[in-house]
Amino acid sequence: MSLDVAATKPHERLAAALDGEMAAVTAMIAQRMASEHAPRIPQVTAHLVEAGGKRLRPMLTLAAAKMCGYDGPYHIHLAATVEFIHTATLLHDDVVDESTQRRGRPTANLLWDNTSSVLVGDYLFARSFQLMVETGSLRVLDILANAAATIAEGEVLQLTAAADLKTTEDTYLKIVRGKTAALFSAATEVGGVIAGMDDVAVKALFTYGDALGISFQMVDDLLDYGGTSSVIGKNTGDDFRERKLTLPVIRAVAAADATERAFWERTIAKGKQEEGDLETALSLLARHGAMESVRHTALDWAATAKSALTDLPDHPIRDMLSDLADYVVARIS
């Protein structure tokens, strides 16, 4: 189909190029999230799935497969798999973080309860494994099963690193690779595998997804301290209130003098937060140039993602994926 010329953002152009495939993914998601015996499952799932969002991860799977010339049916299964894994992690994350807002709407755990969110998340994980098995590819199963384990590992690592001012940039990167980049890289990698691409191309797809996911998460962490609720889909300052050691704070703590260190000890390590503390945190981030330095690091990862694309077939979608890497960081430019 012809691209929508009015769609100016890269993810919108990508969505237009993959319109038919995304419709098939949406239909498969609706079919597979149904439950004959537990109507709460589709209710909870639909609340998240229908909340909008860019559907970036399943689009990456479809884009990789199409760019690599795949003409079979299973990229639809894999895109739905990726979206189910992502939705399951969101349901679980909101329980862990005690969140009340997701994509600008009340969270499922707020509308129903924590138990429903956890159990429906478990159901979606199970559904995702059913879908990936249907492809008949052990390699695909291996990639996505590893991604699911890595996501859980990243979340647990974040839990143990939370409120610990000794958290290093290396630990932060491990957390980001787990909670975000693992699903991005799996989404792109399986698109190449199902298309029968060689190891060089599959590795390039992995590298693109990994670097894009890292850049994406770094930008999200920046937006938490400088975005609006409508942009980030949650409350500005949530990471501060939840005492998460994201990269801007890690860099500000590393540069802190004794007085500033005492502030971070009180607010993050001990969780004794008072009125005006978020504003103080923002001023400290600005004083040490933490926001700008993280933006440059995110730009470096976006450049790594774009560089990986040179090992992939020359295709209009490849250009869109390159533009997408720029757009991810442009959200904070």
Image (cartoon, rainbow, N blue to C red):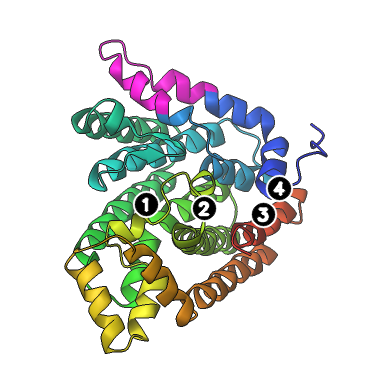
The span from disc 3 to disc 2 (Cα, nearest Å) is: 14 Å
The span from disc 4 to disc 3 (Cα, nearest Å) is: 11 Å
The span from disc 1 to disc 2 (Cα, nearest Å) is: 11 Å
* Mark 1 neighbour density, 10 Å: few (under 14) some (14–19) many (20 or more): many
Query: Amino acid under label 1?
Result: Ala
Q: Which residues are drawn in magenta?
A: 27-47
Q: Earlier in the sequence, mark 1 or mark 3?
A: 1
Q: On the image, numbered disc 1 is attached to which residue?
A: 147
Q: On the image, numbered disc 4 is attached to which residue?
A: 9
Query: Amino acid under label 4?
Result: Lys
Between marks 3 and 2 in the image, the one whose residue lies nearer the viewer = 3
Query: Amino acid under label 3?
Result: Leu
Between marks 1 and 3 in the image, the one whose residue lies nearer the viewer = 3
Give the residue drawn at x 33%, y 61%: 240
List the single residue furthest toward the front. 275
Q: Earlier in the sequence, mark 1 or mark 4?
A: 4
Answer whether labels 1 and 3 touch (C-beta < 8 Å). Answer: no
Give the residue drawn at x 41%, y 26%: 47
Q: Quadrant of the N terminus?
A: top right
Q: Is residue 265 left or right of residue 1?
A: left
The span from disc 4 to disc 2 (Cα, nearest Å) is: 24 Å
Q: Is residue 311 left or right of residue 61?
A: right
Query: Amino acid under label 2?
Result: Glu
- State the SS at label 3: helix
Q: Earlier in the sequence, mark 3 or mark 2?
A: 2
Q: On the image, numbered disc 3 is attached to which residue?
A: 321
